[in-house]
Image (tube, helix red, strand yellow):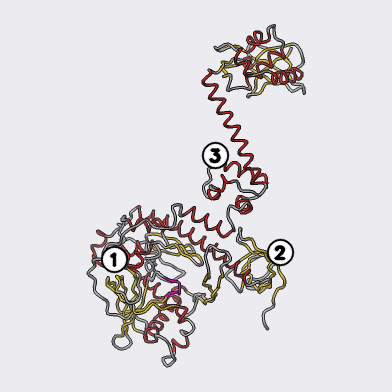
C-alpha cells in the first residue's frame, strides 16, 4: 500500500511501512524511512507505484484546463478527492485524484486552499483582480528581461538612463529598473560602475566620480537657498595697523591677516586678524543652518564648494582696502628673546592693505633674505619681524615636542586650464616645499592663535572644540588637552571661520569671552557639557573625512591625467614600505606588483603600464633599483 502526502509544500508518494493511529512510517524508493503524521496524508492507494503515480499525475494535471475546473467546481469549500469524482464522471483512479489536487494547488488565483486537500474557488471579482495582477507581473518580467538583454548587449535603455545615477547612491532595489540592471551585472560578472560606463550612462570616469559624490552629499544641488545679508550695524573701533594677508592665488575666502607694530626697543605688537562671520552667524539662525549642513568648504582641483554663501563670504572676507569686522589677537613680544609680555583679544574693524599671494613672493622671500637686513626683500619691514618671532615660536614647540618637525616633503598645488568636469582639461602641478619660509611663518602664527584662544576659552569657563593628540591618537573633544605632535598645551581650530564650521563655533565662543569676560559662560552660544556640541563634533568628523577622501581621490585622478598629458612612460619613485611607492614627479602613491623587498627610501625606476580611471589607479612594473649617488 502507498500513500500520497504533503511535506513542506511538496507532494510525495511513498510506500507505507507501518501505521498507527496518528502516524505513518513510510519508505522511499531508495529505502530511506521517515515518520509522517496522518494529518499530512491526502489519500492511500495500491496502484500504480509511487514514482509512476507522480509522473502520470503531473502529466495529466498539465492537461487540465484551470478555467474549466473553476467553472465546474462547487461555489463553496470542497474536498478535492470528492470533486474528482464529479469532474471525471466516475470513481477516480489514484492518478486522477492526484492530478486534480496538483492542478488545484498550482492555481492559487483560482482556488484558495482551506486545509489539507480542501479548496474554495475564488469569487469572480477577486479572480479577475488576481489574473490582472498575474498578467501585470508577467509583462513586468518580460520588460525586465528586455532591459537586461539590452544592457548585456552594451545598450542603455532609455527608462534606465533617467535613474542610472541612483544605482550608485541609493538604488531602489524593489524597482524593475534596478532588478534588470543587477541581473545584467551578475550575468556579465562585472561591477555596477564598469557596466554604467560601458553602456554610456556617464561619458567618462571623472563625471561618474563627481556625480556620485554630489548625489550622495549634495542631493539638493550645490547652490544655497537665498538668504539676505542684513546690514552689519556694528560699533567696532578701526584698528590702527598695517595688515597684509598671504594666500594662494586661487583663494577667495581671506580668513586671516597679520600686522606688526614696532614698540620700544626690540618689542613689537604682532596682530593676528581673523575674519569675524561669527558676528552674524548665530547659533540656530539660517546662516548657521547653512554652515552646519556643509561643515566645511570642499576643495578639489579647479573647483571648490564653499561652506558659506558668496554674499556672506564677501561681507566678511578680509579683502584689501575694505574695513571688515575682525577678531584680533595681539601679542606683545621681544624679538631678541622671544619672550611674550602680554596678549589680548579684541573685536574691531581691520583694513588689510594688500592681499599678497604665495605665487608672487615665494621666489623672493627666502630664509637668506629674511635673515639679512641688507638683502632686498619685498615687504621686508613687515616680514622680517614676523619671521624673527616665528623662529622663537617654532623653537619653543620643538622643545615641547622633543624633536624638530619634518617638513621636507614637497607638496603640490593643482591648477586646471579648462572645465573641472572635462578630463581633457590641462592640469598643472606646481611643487612647493612644505618648509617654505612664508608657509612656516603663517603656520606659526595660526598655531599660536589656536593655542592662545584655546587657553582663552578655558580660562573663561567657555567650552570649545579642541583637537588633541596623546599617545599618538588624534581626536576632537571639548577638553583643552595637549597636542603632542604640534607641541602645544591645547589647540582649538579658530583661524578659518569662513571655511570650517568648528572654527566658526569656536569663534562664537571666543567672541562671548572677549565681550563678557567672567560672565561669558552664562551668555556664550554653547554652555559646558551641552549635548549639541558633542553632536557637532561627531558630524564634523564624519563629514570632514568624507570631504578629505573626495579631495584626495580627485587629486589622484588629476595626477593620473597629468602623467598621461606629459606622456610619461617611465618614472622614478621612492619606496615607502613593502610594495608601496611614492612618485618623485607627482603627489601619487601606488602599489607595484612583484616589487622585491626593499628598504624604506630606496629609489626605483618604474614603467607605467596602464591606468584605471575608475579605480583611480596607475599600473606599474619595476624596471630597476637605483643606487644612491656615491
The answer to whether residue 285 is above or below residue 319 is above
Look at mark 1 in the image and give the residue it sits on.
511
User: What numbered label is drawn on residue 496?
Assistant: none
Judge left or right: residue 181 versus residue 487: right
Q: In the rendering, at what x and y percent does residue 360 appear?
A: 46, 81
Q: Earlier in the sequence, mark 1 or mark 3?
A: 3
The answer to whether residue 566 is above or below residue 155 is below
Q: Which one is nearer the viewer's eye here, 415 or 382?
A: 415
Q: Earlier in the sequence, mark 2 or mark 1?
A: 1
Tell me which segment is drawn in magenta: 247-251
Q: In the rendering, at what x and y percent does residue 198 appear?
A: 64, 53
On the rendered image, what quadrant is the C terminus found in? bottom right
Q: In the rendering, at what x and y percent does residue 342 appear?
A: 29, 77
Q: Are marks 1 and 3 in contact (CB under 8 Å)?
A: no
Characterize the magenta stretch by its predominant secondary structure.
loop
Report, in whole angstroms, how far the alpha carbon at label 1 lies from the one at label 3: 52 Å
Please say whether residue 91 is visible from this viewpoint.
yes
SS class of the residue under badge 2?
loop
Q: Earlier in the sequence, mark 2 or mark 3?
A: 3
Pointer 3: residues within 10 angstroms few (<14), some, or many (20+)? Answer: few
Report, in whole angstroms, how far the alpha carbon at label 2 lies from the one at label 3: 44 Å
Q: Are marks 2 and 1 in contact (CB under 8 Å)?
A: no
The answer to whether residue 139 is above or below residue 372 is above
Report, in whole angstroms, how far the alpha carbon at label 2 lies from the one at label 1: 58 Å
> For the point 49% across and 62% down, which residue is it?
548
Look at mark 2 in the image and give the residue it sits on.
594
Q: Which one is nearer the viewer's eye here, 238 or 446?
A: 238
Judge left or right: residue 53 versus residue 84: right
Look at mark 3 in the image and give the residue it sits on.
174
* Residue depth check, mark 2 versus mark 3: number of the one nearer the observer: 3
On the rendered image, what quadrant is the N terminus found in? top right
Pointer 2: residues within 10 angstroms few (<14), some, or many (20+)? Answer: few
Amino acid at each position: 500500500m502507498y500513500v500520497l502526502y504533503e511535506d513542506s509544500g511538496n507532494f510525495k508518494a511513498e510506500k507505507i511501512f507501518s501505521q498507527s493511529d496518528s502516524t505513518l512510517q513510510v519508505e522511499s524508493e531508495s529505502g530511506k524511512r521517515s515518520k509522517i503524521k496522518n494529518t499530512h496524508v491526502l489519500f492511500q492507494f495500491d496502484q500504480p507505484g509511487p514514482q509512476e503515480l507522480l509522473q502520470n499525475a503531473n502529466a495529466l494535471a498539465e492537461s487540465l484546463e484551470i478555467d474549466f475546473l473553476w467553472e465546474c467546481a462547487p461555489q463553496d469549500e470542497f474536498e478535492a478527492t470528492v470533486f474528482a469524482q464529479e469532474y471525471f464522471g466516475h470513481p477516480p483512479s489514484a492518478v486522477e485524484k492526484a492530478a486534480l489536487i496538483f492542478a488545484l494547488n498550482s492555481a492559487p488565483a483560482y482556488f484558495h486552499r482551506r486545509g489539507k486537500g480542501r479548496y474554495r474557488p475564488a469569487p469572480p471579482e477577486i479572480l479577475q483582480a488576481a489574473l490582472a495582477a498575474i498578467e501585470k507581473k508577467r509583462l513586468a518580467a518580460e520588460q525586465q528581461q528586455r532591459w537586461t538583454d539590452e544592457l548585456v548587449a552594451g545598450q542603455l535603455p532609455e527608462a534606465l538612463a533617467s535613474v542610472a545615477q541612483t544605482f550608485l547612491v541609493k538604488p531602489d532595489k524593489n524597482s524593475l529598473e534596478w532588478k534588470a540592471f543587477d541581473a545584467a551585472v551578475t550575468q556579465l560578472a562585472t561591477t555596477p560602475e564598469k557596466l554604467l560606463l560601458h553602456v554610456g550612462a556617464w561619458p567618462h570616469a571623472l563625471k561618474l566620480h563627481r556625480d556620485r559624490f554630489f548625489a550622495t552629499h549634495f542631493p539638493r544641488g550645490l547652490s544655497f537657498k537665498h538668504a539676505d545679508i542684513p546690514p552689519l550695524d556694528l560699533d567696532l573701533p578701526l584698528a590702527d595697523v598695517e595688515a597684509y594677508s598671504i594666500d594662494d592665488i586661487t583663494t577667495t575666502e581671506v580668513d586671516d591677516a597679520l600686522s606688526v607694530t614696532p614698540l620700544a626697543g626690540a618689542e613689537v605688537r604682532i596682530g593676528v586678524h581673523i575674519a569675524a562671520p561669527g558676528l552674524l552667524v548665530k547659533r540656530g539662525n539660517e546662516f548657521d543652518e547653512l554652515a552646519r549642513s556643509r561643515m566645511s568648504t570642499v576643495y578639489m582641483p579647479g573647483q571648490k564648494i564653499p561652506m558659506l554663501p558668496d554674499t556672506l563670504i564677501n561681507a566678511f572676507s578680509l579683502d584689501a582696502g575694505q574695513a571688515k569686522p575682525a577678531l584680533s589677537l595681539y601679542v606683545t613680544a621681544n624679538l631678541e628673546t622671544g619672550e611674550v609680555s602680554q596678549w589680548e583679544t579684541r573685536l574691531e574693524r581691520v583694513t588689510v592693505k594688500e592681499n599678497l599671494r604665495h605665487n608672487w613672493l615665494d621666489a623672493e622671500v627666502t630664509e637668506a633674505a629674511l635673515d639679512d637686513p641688507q638683502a632686498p626683500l619685498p615687504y621686508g619691514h613687515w616680514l622680517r619681524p614676523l619671521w624673527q618671532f616665528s623662529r622663537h615660536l617654532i623653537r619653543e614647540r620643538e622643545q615641547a615636542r622633543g624633536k624638530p618637525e619634518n617638513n621636507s616633503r614637497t607638496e603640490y598645488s593643482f591648477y586646471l586650464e579648462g572645465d573641472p568636469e572635462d578630463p581633457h582639461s590641462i592640469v598643472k602641478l606646481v611643487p612647493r616645499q612644505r618648509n617654505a619660509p612664508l608657509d612656516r611663518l603663517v603656520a606659526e602664527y595660526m598655531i599660536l592663535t589656536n593655542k592662545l584662544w584655546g587657553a582663552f576659552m578655558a580660562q573663561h569657563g567657555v567650552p570649545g572644540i579642541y583637537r588633541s593628540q596623546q599617545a599618538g591618537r588624534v581626536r576632537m573633544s571639548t577638553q583643552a588637552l595637549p597636542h603632542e605632535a604640534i607641541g602645544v598645551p591645547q589647540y582649538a581650530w579658530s583661524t578659518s571661520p569662513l571655511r570650517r564650521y568648528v572654527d566658526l563655533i569656536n569663534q562664537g565662543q571666543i567672541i562671548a569671552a572677549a565681550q563678557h569676560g567672567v560672565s561669558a559662560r552664562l551668555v556664550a552660544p554653547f554652555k559646558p557639557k551641552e549635548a549639541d556640541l558633542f553632536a557637532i563634533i561627531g558630524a564634523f568628523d564624519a563629514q570632514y573625512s568624507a570631504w578629505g577622501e573626495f579631495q584626495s581621490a580627485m587629486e589622484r585622478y588629476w595626477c593620473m591625467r597629468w602623467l598621461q598629458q606629459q606622456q610619461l612612460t617611465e618614472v622614478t619613485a621612492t619606496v615607502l614600505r613593502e610594495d608601496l611607492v611614492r612618485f618623485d614627479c607627482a603627489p601619487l602613491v601606488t602599489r607595484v606588483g612583484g616589487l622585491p623587498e626593499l628598504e624604506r627610501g630606496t629609489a626605483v625606476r618604474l614603467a607605467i603600464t596602464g591606468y584605471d580611471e575608475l579605480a583611480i589607479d596607475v599600473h606599474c612594473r619595476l624596471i630597476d633599483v637605483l643606487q644612491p649617488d656615491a
